[in-house]
Image (cartoon, rainbow, N blue to C red):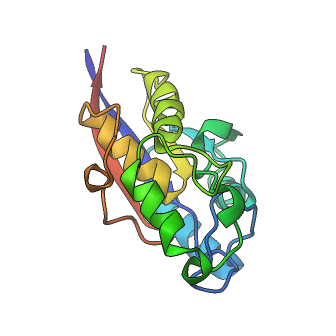
Amino acid sequence: MGAHKLWLVRHAQPLLEPGVCYGRLDVAADPQATRICAEALAEVLPSCIAVISSPLQRCELLAQALQGLRADLTYKTDARLQEMDFGDWEGRRWSDIPQAALAAWTARFGDHAVGGHGETVAAVMARTAAAFDELSPATDTLWITHAGVMRAAGLIARGVRQVARADQWPVAGPAYGQWCTLDLHLS
């Protein structure tokens, strides 16, 4: 049994107005903020770390910038690291989403398809857990991902695989370009 570290980094600020719901919406991130994040991350990442990115461009731009700074790092994409699909809410202002729709999600937080046809929190947890369970015990891994996946991974690392109620979901999330590490012990 060896110590293993999962690095989690959130993409830089997306090029969207504040207050817009975006999950699967494939928007670019601010190029300068992406470069600043990549430069800071390149300084602290260990060599031979496996880099896996969400395929959404705001994450892939960071992966590409990081690879440009560190020739020893290559990355692959994994669709399981994408942000939650918010269905019909994608691209809408949060303030324009009816309170009744938000209340319905809160009432059945784990299994409610967000935005009518979007994803459930249970589905986000399941796909994040599937990627988590494939982590190699032989090397550290970096996930370039989104706030929702980072929250899910933190829960999974603590042994929580299902979230039924909204009060079980972490309120605080990572800032844009912020990273954290999870110390894991995998067999």
Measuring 74% from the left and 59% from the top, which residue is drawn there?
57
Rendering quarter of residue 93: bottom right
Quarter of the image with the C terminus is: top left
Nearer-the-camera pick, 109 or 148: 109
Vertical arrangement, residue 137 with respect to residue 144, above or below: above
Report the residue that reaches farthest toward the front.
100
Report the residue that reaches farthest toward the bottom.
17
Nearer-the-camera pick, 40 or 17: 17
Residue 108 coordinates in the image, percent (x, y): 41, 47
Residue 61 coordinates in the image, percent (x, y): 72, 61
Residue 64 coordinates in the image, percent (x, y): 72, 56
Residue 120 coordinates in the image, percent (x, y): 53, 43
Measuring 66% from the left and 81% from the top, which residue is drawn there?
32
Nearer-the-camera pick, 1 or 153: 153
Q: Is residue 150 left or right of residue 97?
A: left
Vertical arrangement, residue 37 with respect to residue 19, above or below: above
Quarter of the image with the N terminus is: top left
